[in-house]
């Protein structure tokens, strides 16, 4: 059963530049450009990220003249979701408006954590066979403000403990804005989240991956999905440019000096990548990498030739990996009744 | 990422795009890409190599994107200017016989294969907005004859199908065997539906939107997804 959630009907149009998504330094620079002391930028930072206000009028310790000036020239940048759906398992999916289109964010409550899966782009360029977002083509990058807004404007935003960059889009293909959003989420002046509570998931784009590790401390998950070059290239065109072995080699090197957690995401497709042969090759290519494999049940999407693996095949794969010292977890499927597959809801809405 | 400074040999307009060449300093396989930048401090952008792998120069095809971070600056390059290039990488490869589907500068890897004398396409479906974007159409006509299927989405011309490559694929007859002739060019009447094979390998290169749609059409018409390998622009 699916429940429609009450949310805003019509989004406000942002014709003015938004302040949400600016770093403290950018807000200090902005304050100075308006003839105010840099300290005013700190106040703006507090209002945006600590007190989470939605209008300039709520910034009551700013002079009224400045509030009027800000209202005239800028938008705060907060936008409530347009539409939401709730799954029987408690997962909620929201559509956020972005320049006439929508992006998805999925709220996933569990006993010990409340996670939001955020989007980083409108559409995607990667063209993965199993992904609905790719069928939209690519419409643009989200700004850091539009990424952070998904967290702040979520009706359950105050409950969130974790965020995963696994929604629509390839985060490393929008590196600058994604890194800026991570800075806002993890800085003491921003949301103040621990880097351990955030995971960025990617198909693996070098050299953006190298830059991500150099400039951020959040966790990383690699979308792997097949250990064989040719098979992976049929599933994921990116394999033809950024080879899996080069990415794994980089991750092994980085682990020598960087202890952050690296996860392997592995969607299981019936008869395609869930056989003993795949288990053996996975063990081989992951040798030397400290990692955990998340085995994920495939959420079917319209028109795909792929089917989700049977439970027995996933268990066998998990056991085959564990026997050889590769820890693997079968991730519980969430929100299938609300089109929780990445990009499905927003694609059907177009 | 190791970058090598190279001197530009040629940067000439070619239809709606540019053909950029520099003295080749590496060996490569057709289908591979190189990263280009004008400064070692800036991020590289990836381009498929379009030249033959025995040519003394290496070349890419690119389109100038207004407001883009690199292409407006690439477009201003002159012979002897310095360009920074990565080593070639990637594994987009070509079997002995296959159907190529390309739009815009996505023709580059097929061109490289053809110019290298290594597994050029057996049948080629090439798309562009207008005829001048059908890069090297004369070469393809000469090499492939009726197995060359050009499409233009915004210009009508003799021997060129009006529409997008994905529209043509939707109209196509797909069956087992080698596939076959292209459209031909009937003097009168509606264009004939082309024939493609469900058993041949397919190689797609172009925008993600085209690649995803073309792949969906081929799969729907009975081509196993394992036979379809794509390279997308990003």
Image (tube, rainbow, N blue to C red):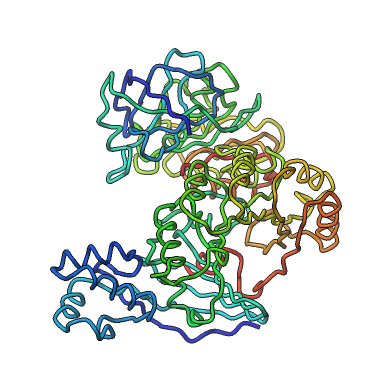
The one of A157 and B30 positioned closer to us in this rendering: A157
Q: Is residue B192 left or right of residue B72?
A: right
Residue A178 visible in this rendered orientation of the protein: yes
The one of A243 and A271 positioned closer to us in this rendering: A243
Residue A233 visible in this rendered orientation of the protein: no
Q: Residue at x 42, y 28 (%)?
A: B85
How many marks do you count on the picture?
0
Q: Which quadrant of the figure has residue A310?
A: bottom right
Q: Is residue A283 left or right of residue A215?
A: right
> Relative to A93, does residue B194 appear above or below in the rendering?
above
The quarter of the rendered structure image containing the N terminus of chain A is: bottom right
Q: Is residue A76 left or right of residue B117?
A: left
> Relative to A292, does residue B69 appear above or below in the rendering?
above
Q: Position of residue B58 (x, y in %)?
A: 43, 20
The one of A93 and A134 positioned closer to us in this rendering: A93
Q: Residue at x 67, y 34 (%)?
A: B200
The one of A72 and A87 positioned closer to us in this rendering: A72
Q: Residue at x 65, y 38 (%)?
A: A245
Q: Position of residue A5 (x, y in %)?
A: 52, 85
């Amino acid at each position: 059963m699916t429940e429609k959630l009450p949310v805003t009907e019509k989004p406000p149009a942002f014709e003015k530049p938004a302040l949400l998504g600016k770093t403290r330094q950018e807000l200090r620079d902005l304050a100075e450009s308006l003839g105010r002391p840099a300290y005013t930028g700190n106040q703006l930072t507090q209002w945006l990220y600590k007190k989470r206000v939605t209008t300039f009028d709520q910034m009551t310790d700013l002079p009224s003249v400045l509030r009027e000036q800000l209202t005239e020239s800028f938008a705060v940048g907060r936008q409530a979701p347009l539409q939401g759906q709730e799954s029987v398992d408690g997962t909620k999916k929201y559509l956020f408006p972005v320049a006439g289109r929508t992006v998805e964010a999925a709220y996933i409550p569990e006993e010990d954590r409340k996670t939001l899966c955020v989007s980083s782009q409108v559409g995607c360029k990667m063209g993965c066979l199993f992904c609905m977002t790719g069928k939209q083509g690519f419409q643009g990058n989200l700004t850091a403000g539009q990424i952070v807004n998904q967290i702040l404007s979520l009706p359950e935003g105050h409950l969130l403990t974790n965020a995963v960059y696994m929604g629509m889009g390839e985060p490393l293909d929008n590196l600058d804005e994604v890194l800026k959003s991570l800075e806002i989420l993890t800085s003491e002046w921003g949301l103040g989240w621990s880097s351990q509570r955030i995971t960025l998931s990617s198909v693996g784009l070098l050299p953006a991956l190298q830059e991500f590790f150099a400039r951020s401390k959040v966790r990383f998950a690699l979308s792997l999905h097949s250990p064989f070059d040719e098979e992976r290239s049929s599933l994921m065109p990116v394999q033809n440019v950024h080879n899996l072995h080069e990415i794994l080699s980089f991750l092994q090197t980085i682990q020598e000096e960087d202890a952050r957690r690296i996860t392997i995401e592995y969607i299981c497709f019936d008869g395609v990548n869930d056989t003993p042969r795949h288990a053996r090759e996975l063990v081989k290519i992951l040798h030397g990498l400290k990692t955990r494999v998340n085995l994920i049940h495939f959420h079917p999407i319209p028109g795909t030739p792929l089917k989700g693996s049977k439970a027995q095949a996933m268990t066998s794969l998990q056991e085959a990996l564990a026997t050889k010292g590769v820890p693997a977890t079968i991730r519980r499927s969430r929100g299938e009744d609300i089109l929780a597959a990445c990009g499905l809801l927003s694609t059907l809405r177009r | 990422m190791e970058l090598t400074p190279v001197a530009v040999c040629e940067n000439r307009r070619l239809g709606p795009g540019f053909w950029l060449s520099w003295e080749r300093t590496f060996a490569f396989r057709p289908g591979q890409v190189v990263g280009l930048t004008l400064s070692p401090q800036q991020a590289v952008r990836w381009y498929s190599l379009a030249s033959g792998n025995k040519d003394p120069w290496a070349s890419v095809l690119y389109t100038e994107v207004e407001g883009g971070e690199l292409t407006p600056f690439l477009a201003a390059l002159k012979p002897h200017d310095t360009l920074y290039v990565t080593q070639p990488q990637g594994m987009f490869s070509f079997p002995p016989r296959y159907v190529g589907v390309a739009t815009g500068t996505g023709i580059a890897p097929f061109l490289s294969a053809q110019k290298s004398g290594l597994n050029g396409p057996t049948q080629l479906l090439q798309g562009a907005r207008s005829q001048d974007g059908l890069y090297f159409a004369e070469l393809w006509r000469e090499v492939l004859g009726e197995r060359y299927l050009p499409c233009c989405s915004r210009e009508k011309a003799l021997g060129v199908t009006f529409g997008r490559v994905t529209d043509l694929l939707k109209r196509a007859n797909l069956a087992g065997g080698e596939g076959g002739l292209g459209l031909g060019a009937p003097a009168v009447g509606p264009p004939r539906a082309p024939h493609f094979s469900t058993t041949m390998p397919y190689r797609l290169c172009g925008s993600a939107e085209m690649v995803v749609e073309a792949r969906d059409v081929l799969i729907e018409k009975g081509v196993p997804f394992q036979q379809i390998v794509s390279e997308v622009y990003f």
